[in-house]
């Protein structure tokens, strides 16, 4: 971690520091928002521009497995501007135009989002990354990948690039439990993710990851135990998704054949608030729930917009007078997963 990133983390307010009725984080929020960090760091509104680099995944192409993750449908979350039929430069140009018009964004992170964006030789990847950085309004990269698709040469390239641009690696994880990772066909275990994190730290690279809450075979206690595990990992930011099933996925087809229990709306609100309470207040939160187009969503259909879900989470935190990190203790023992 660079000194600049370290200082940014140290500025994060600790849980319990707020006046009555407000949250301890910027703008009175009750959890530590990643978007706020970017706005403070760059002095303007930052948005991610998603691009499709035309890559695949090692658990799709046979490198470690076939079929892909059982829950995954890249088509369910990509904006229209992320079109692998276009060059990265054209995707960036179109995406920036859309985000500038819709959100008033001023600067941009190029998000290499679908599939595994380090699953290729470095000599193929570097021109893709550099073409994204060439746009004058792009301040950096966010590269979505897997912990089994990183090596020293790639890390050295990211480390060097991070001296000039903001560089974020988002390692997909989904669960710390090896039994879950096997069941959803991830093709790697929790130790693989821990090793990737160990090799990626102290290079000036911002480190993010994804977790899914709500696998029906995991207990509430197991899900909550992932918060201290993440807090001990050296993570900079976290995305939380509730388990939602989309059409034309292996897990979706399993559900259609034999429906299984998914989290109810109020149940998820309670779970995510409990998770945030146990999460280190130094970790920036990028997402609190998943989403999919209504045409692709199987279940659960909570009948609420993203804005409504986000507000309900914030209202639940406020009604309980709690916040991210309230139950966090730095000396907690990491739960190793099994």
Image: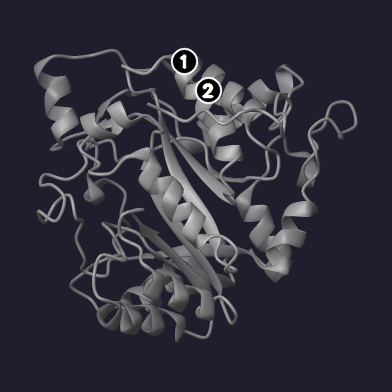
Q: Note whether 242 is above or below 125 in the view shown.
A: above
Q: Note whether 50 is above or below 261 in the view shown.
A: below
- Quick one: 157 or 267, which is closer to the camera? 157
Residue 315 falls in which quadrant of the image? top right
The colour scheme is one colour
Q: Position of residue 52 (x, y in %)?
A: 28, 66
Q: Residue at x 36, y 47 (%)?
A: 192
Q: Position of residue 212 (x, y in %)?
A: 40, 33
- Can residue 101 be seen by looking at this rendering? no
CB atoms of marks 1 and 2 within 8 Å = yes
Q: Secondary structure at mark 1?
A: helix
What distance separates the C-alpha of mark 1 from that of mark 2?
6 Å
Residue receiving disc 1: 220
Q: Position of residue 76 (x, y in %)?
A: 26, 46
Disc 2 packing (10 Å; few <14; some 14–19; many ≥20): many
**The disc label shown at residue 304, or none:** none
From the viewer's perspective, tell me whether residue 53 is left or right of residue 103.
Answer: left
Q: Position of residue 165 (x, y in %)?
A: 56, 77
- Quick one: 96 or 174, which is closer to the camera? 174
From the viewer's perspective, tell me whether residue 337 is left or right of residue 236.
Answer: left
Q: Secondary structure at mark 2?
A: helix
Residue 104 falls in which quadrant of the image? bottom right
Number of numbered tags placed on the structure image: 2
Q: Residue furthest right?
A: 19
Q: Quadrant of the N terminus?
A: bottom right
Disc 1 packing (10 Å; few <14; some 14–19; many ≥20): some
Q: Residue at x 59, y 27 (%)?
A: 313
- Quick one: 199 or 48, which is closer to the camera? 199
**The disc label shown at residue 224, or none:** 2
Q: Quadrant of the C terminus?
A: top left
- Can residue 88 be seen by looking at this rendering? yes
Q: Note whether 162 is above or below 47 in the view shown.
A: below
């Amino acid at each position: 971690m660079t000194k600049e990133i370290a200082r940014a983390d140290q500025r994060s307010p600790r849980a319990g520091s707020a006046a009555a009725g407000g949250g301890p984080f910027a703008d009175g929020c009750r959890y530590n928002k990643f978007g706020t960090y970017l706005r403070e760091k760059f002095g303007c509104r930052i948005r991610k521009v998603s691009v499709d680099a035309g890559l695949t995944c090692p658990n799709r192409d046979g490198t470690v497995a076939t079929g892909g993750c059982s829950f995954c449908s890249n088509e369910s979350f990509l904006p229209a501007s992320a079109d692998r039929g276009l060059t990265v430069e054209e995707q960036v140009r179109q995406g920036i135009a859309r985000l500038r018009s819709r959100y008033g964004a001023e600067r941009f992170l190029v998000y290499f989002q679908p599939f595994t964006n380090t699953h290729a030789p470095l000599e193929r990847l570097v021109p893709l990354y550099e073409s994204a950085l060439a746009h004058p309004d792009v301040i950096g990269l966010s590269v979505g990948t897997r912990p089994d698709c990183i090596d020293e040469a790639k890390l050295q390239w990211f480390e060097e690039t991070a001296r000039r641009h903001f560089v974020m690696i988002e390692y997909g994880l989904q669960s710390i439990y090896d039994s879950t990772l096997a069941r959803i066909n991830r093709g790697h275990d929790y130790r693989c993710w821990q090793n990737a994190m160990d090799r990626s730290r102290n290079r000036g690279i911002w480190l993010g990851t994804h977790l899914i809450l709500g696998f029906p075979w995991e207990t509430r206690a197991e899900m909550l135990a992932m918060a201290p595990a993440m807090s001990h990992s050296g993570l900079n930011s976290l995305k939380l998704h509730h388990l939602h099933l989309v059409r034309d996925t292996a897990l979706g087809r399993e559900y259609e054949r034999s429906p299984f229990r998914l989290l109810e709306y109020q149940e998820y609100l309670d779970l995510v608030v409990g998770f945030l309470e146990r999460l280190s207040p130094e970790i920036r939160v990028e997402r609190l729930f998943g989403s999919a187009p209504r045409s692709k969503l199987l279940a659960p259909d909570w009948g609420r917009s993203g804005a409504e879900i986000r507000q309900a989470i914030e209202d639940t935190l406020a009604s309980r007078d709690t916040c991210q990190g309230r139950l966090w203790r730095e000396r907690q023992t990491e739960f190793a997963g099994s």
